[in-house]
Amino acid sequence: MIVVLKHGVSPEKRDQLIAWLENLGLRIHVSDGDYQTVLGLIGDVSVVDMDLVASLEIVDTVKLVSEPFKCCNRQFHPDDLIVEVGSVRIGGGNFAMIAGPCSVETEEQIVAVAKAVKASGAQLLRGGAFKPRTSPYDFQGLKGTGIELLKIARAETGLPIVTEVMSAHDLPLFEDVDVIQIGARNMQNFDLLREAGKLGRPILLKRGMANTLKELLMSAEYIMASGNERVILCERGIRTFSDYTRNTLDLSAVSVLHELTHLPVIVDPSHATGVARYVPPMALAAAAAGADGLIIEVHNDPMHALCDGAQSLRPEEYDALAKKIRAVREAIR
Amino acid sequence: MIVVLKHGVSPEKRDQLIAWLENLGLRIHVSDGDYQTVLGLIGDVSVVDMDLVASLEIVDTVKLVSEPFKCCNRQFHPDDLIVEVGSVRIGGGNFAMIAGPCSVETEEQIVAVAKAVKASGAQLLRGGAFKPRTSPYDFQGLKGTGIELLKIARAETGLPIVTEVMSAHDLPLFEDVDVIQIGARNMQNFDLLREAGKLGRPILLKRGMANTLKELLMSAEYIMASGNERVILCERGIRTFSDYTRNTLDLSAVSVLHELTHLPVIVDPSHATGVARYVPPMALAAAAAGADGLIIEVHNDPMHALCDGAQSLRPEEYDALAKKIRAVREAIR
Amino acid sequence: MIVVLKHGVSPEKRDQLIAWLENLGLRIHVSDGDYQTVLGLIGDVSVVDMDLVASLEIVDTVKLVSEPFKCCNRQFHPDDLIVEVGSVRIGGGNFAMIAGPCSVETEEQIVAVAKAVKASGAQLLRGGAFKPRTSPYDFQGLKGTGIELLKIARAETGLPIVTEVMSAHDLPLFEDVDVIQIGARNMQNFDLLREAGKLGRPILLKRGMANTLKELLMSAEYIMASGNERVILCERGIRTFSDYTRNTLDLSAVSVLHELTHLPVIVDPSHATGVARYVPPMALAAAAAGADGLIIEVHNDPMHALCDGAQSLRPEEYDALAKKIRAVREAIR
Amino acid sequence: MIVVLKHGVSPEKRDQLIAWLENLGLRIHVSDGDYQTVLGLIGDVSVVDMDLVASLEIVDTVKLVSEPFKCCNRQFHPDDLIVEVGSVRIGGGNFAMIAGPCSVETEEQIVAVAKAVKASGAQLLRGGAFKPRTSPYDFQGLKGTGIELLKIARAETGLPIVTEVMSAHDLPLFEDVDVIQIGARNMQNFDLLREAGKLGRPILLKRGMANTLKELLMSAEYIMASGNERVILCERGIRTFSDYTRNTLDLSAVSVLHELTHLPVIVDPSHATGVARYVPPMALAAAAAGADGLIIEVHNDPMHALCDGAQSLRPEEYDALAKKIRAVREAIR
């Protein structure tokens, strides 16, 4: 940690601060410039409250020189993590196509969509059983029944299943789920992160709509600190002033995350845009930007979907898109 | 709900849409302008997926004409709700001063701060027992022990206590807490909202840092739909590009919320700014803007606080501020 | 325009509003729902101040049903506009590669870069002569001399030139420039838009970092209203809370703009990210998303560039990128 | 400037960077921590492109330790600047009430409003002659005639006048204007800043809706670098995702700016909210937060205003508000 003092600070005040920091067990390296003094803190800086130091009257600014995340830090894990889900590999050059309806509705629906997306090349089946809805009056998902229907679709197609958990209380229902999703609204539900991580299943962690990449990594850290390193990160759009799409897809996050961490990074163009006709261009853009996979909503009858029909592709649209995605992947080799 | 069709839509497509909507049980009022056709949907529009209709090729835009929140809607509750906590009243012209440390640390600390803030006019004591921390490596709070220490401080001072719950699993520990806080990061943890609401205690619901006011009200609706109408809303800053304070305090939310809902609206200037010396001006501004109360962090020894010392006022600073707040409240009568 | 009245408005107040609107020359179509009354305004609604009506006590909301932009509205111009610059065509399936240094520095530099980017397939040469700099103490560009150097590079390579104007006062210097750029900070410098438009040259109009797409189109309208329809729009990143890149590239803008307008839409990944190593993935993403071109900074010696060296590619990096861009373009056919 | 190197950088690469920096005329102070090396750059760091250094592969981060603004830096100007406009003083404890219509429309209108706001205690008259409008089809102001009408109102009431300039070309018309306003959309119209500054008149500089406080100060620096130090800063709301008001008023900017600069800071609650009924609470909040003044829109007939009637107070509303503002100012002494 580096502490920059304000111009013209008295030697007494400076020495008081140094004494207080040394008292916390740190060594202090003092560097005097023409205008300002810089303190380099050496040792275990996690004992210092950075915001508190920054708020002191004599301090201009504080800068952390090493990232606070360890388990997911590329610095300590130079090789890409490859998350294996059954025979599917995600990350390290392996591109994952995940698709399925927003909500699981009926056995007929989920099996039909699963077969369709598999035929188009999808390797994992997504489907919501527990649905986070802004309104308590909207359809909340089939819950446990939905998970059972996903398992039937898995049995019929061989596709591993991805589905969202909203509460630690429901985790027992997810023991036989292949990838557990933690949604954007729960990215900082720290209790859920910790408990979900303990199941030992791969976790698909979505970025919250107002969260920085560092916060996303700190949330991954909550999962990984309990010993489960199989975390897949997902960019799904952030909230901005821009008002023509539901969120603003922040594709540069893919490149930045690949530098900061060894975890795979996939993209969700369906929730990022909220509009089915914008999904293909954003999916192709994500593939071109180097994402490790795509999670896309597909519904066989969007006009009668119980949830998010507006952003769902029809199976034939997904099929056409999947072909182009493969071509783009080929083009950027 | 109003559906505006695009210019030049064919009569066949228009009639198909109308037939589909009528099939959902709605009556449709057609209004032809020079350029566009507007459909007014009459009946129970909750059966229609607004986003789906908006995404149809022939539709320009969709507009909901009545708000989706009922329980907290000012339209159906013209009189201000006054939340009573013991002998303290919040809302309807009653201004609540809530103060205390970010975290409960020791009995000595919490009792000392409680006495100090009470002497300055605070009516409720806040203190964190369960702490939402970005990093899993930071101090996570004393948990159950922290709640016990708050109760000791309550017994010593008579101040009702306000403390945050982070997981439905911990709710049994909160049965004797006077006001249960749901933090910004959990504003859309729908499971927690529902379960916390069932305890029947007053709930202090903080706005998420990227949430609209409508989303805040929909979250209040989750609590109130289970029969508990005692919800206090709290503006605590939103996330913007502005980088000199931790968040950007959105004070106009106070006025807008007072129009939309009958629930009391308080302000948290400590988390909004993250810097102790900006707390007094923002607290005074909130009082001048018509807030129903203030929740402020006060610590007897900010330099050694285990959490958020940077934004904590010292008791003597709080005392000076409290006097000015009363004067401002007097000035805007 | 549609005006939705609040629930429970008295017939007198409603009739007063209708009378006031009719007095402005409009016909009013009244539609009564179960909960609310909707007025459809028919006629020349440009005489009504939409914000004023929205602010009236009895009004819930106001909705414009036709877009306020005409000259650049896709509705009236179904075919893509192709902007011709010499023999280069932009839009309507023609992809433009624009490249060059942030600032023109010397004849040697600009000619060398021009030759290099031409060899890699660039069709237009960019280079800043007038530089908008946040600080008055930073290098402000070579101004008129810079434009002369660009012309020399054009003579040597045959590449048409693109350069930014910052003040209407300087426009005489731009009479022989092929494409005049209006930068993000001047997107709502209405005087400059109007005056630059009058020169009759193609205009490259960049989106302001906090501007909506509708505002961008209204600024295009300022240019086009003076009779110059050759406007090229450019997405270059918006300002958000996200802090790892200089701006957040909003790629969905490409798809949305293609629906709203017939003007070509290009992307600037250099300013969007501010970091050279993020430029290739974002450039490829933009091509995959359907952009009509790319404007990219290339410098033969970024370590000694007078401006924005951080985001400049080296010629050999640009060459490798250009090949991949062509492959991606091929892949999405 | 401080340069933090990445962990594990080779001594060769480190020494290359140091040599390159020393070559620019700087002395380098090297500080080795357990994990990282920090270079302190001593000397004239303005010769270094901070972004370029930050983008180097071996560099983790770069931090400027002294602010790049000089003329408006509180560090070099500890005493508040008091801007004198005729007999009115702004800053240093002097609170300025500025009021008037959005647009000057007729002599009758501007004189009537001037007399009304003067009677309520306003000390300066505002009124738009040149109007920045998003649409080229909206009323653009009376221009030169508007300025003449303002002068008539000044002659009738003695109130100095404040009006906005949109183009350097129009500056000759502003020679007899008391305070020249530069609007939010032109905050980074650097040519206009420089030229307007040269007139030697006080400048009211509004913060752009997506600009940081540092950028605002750099724009003030453009004006002051030409020798004119009489700059008044104005917070008028920033653009965020929050959608119930036109902008989000960032009141903490008042406190932060007071620390960073000696220039006076006023607030515009009319443009910040866009809604007349939210203006009084935000005006009172700004006064409570320590602003040096308020600029508020007042119109004698908002229903027939040519511009921004929605946000204009009626004279009697302004009168009631002015009384409360004085009371709040008294309360925070």
Image (spheres, coloured by chain):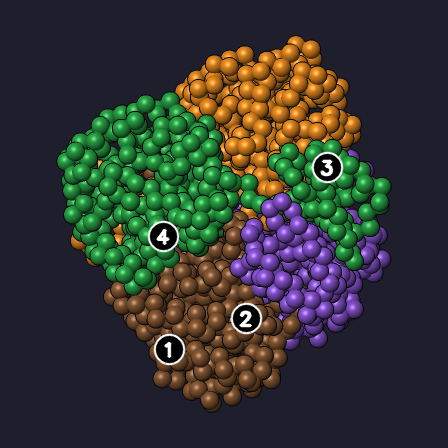
Chain colours: A green, B orange, C brown, D purple
Residue D233 visible somewhere in the drawing: no
Disc assigned to residue A21: 3
Q: Which residue is mark 4?
A: A291
For the point 30% across and 50% down, the residue is: A94
C-alpha span from label 4 to label 1: 27 Å
Whether discs 1 and 3 lie on one chain: the answer is: no
Between discs 1 and 2, the one toward the N terminus: 1
Whether discs 4 and 3 lie on one chain: the answer is: yes
Image x and y of residue D146, in percent: 66, 67
In the image, residue D11 sits, relative to residue A198, either above or below, namely below
Image x and y of residue A284, in percent: 31, 57
Q: Which type of secondary structure does the marked residue at label 3 adopt?
A: helix
The chain to which mark 1 is attached is C
Q: Amino acid at mark 2?
A: Pro
The residue carrying pointer 2 sits among few (fewer than 14), some (14 to 19) or many (20 or more) residues within 10 Å by Cα, namely many
The chain to which mark 2 is attached is C
Tell which tag, 4 or 2, sits nearer the viewer: 2
C-alpha span from label 4 to label 2: 28 Å
Whether discs 1 and 2 lie on one chain: the answer is: yes
Q: Which type of secondary structure does the marked residue at label 4 adopt?
A: loop
Say which of A93 and A316 sits in front: A93
C-alpha span from label 1 to label 3: 58 Å
The chain to which mark 4 is attached is A
Image x and y of residue C279, in percent: 45, 63
Q: Amino acid at mark 1?
A: Gly
The chain to which mark 3 is attached is A
Q: Which type of secondary structure does the marked residue at label 2 adopt?
A: helix
For the point 51% across and 36% down, the residue is: B208
Disc assigned to residue C121: 1
C-alpha span from label 4 to label 3: 43 Å
Q: Which residue is mark 2?
A: C302
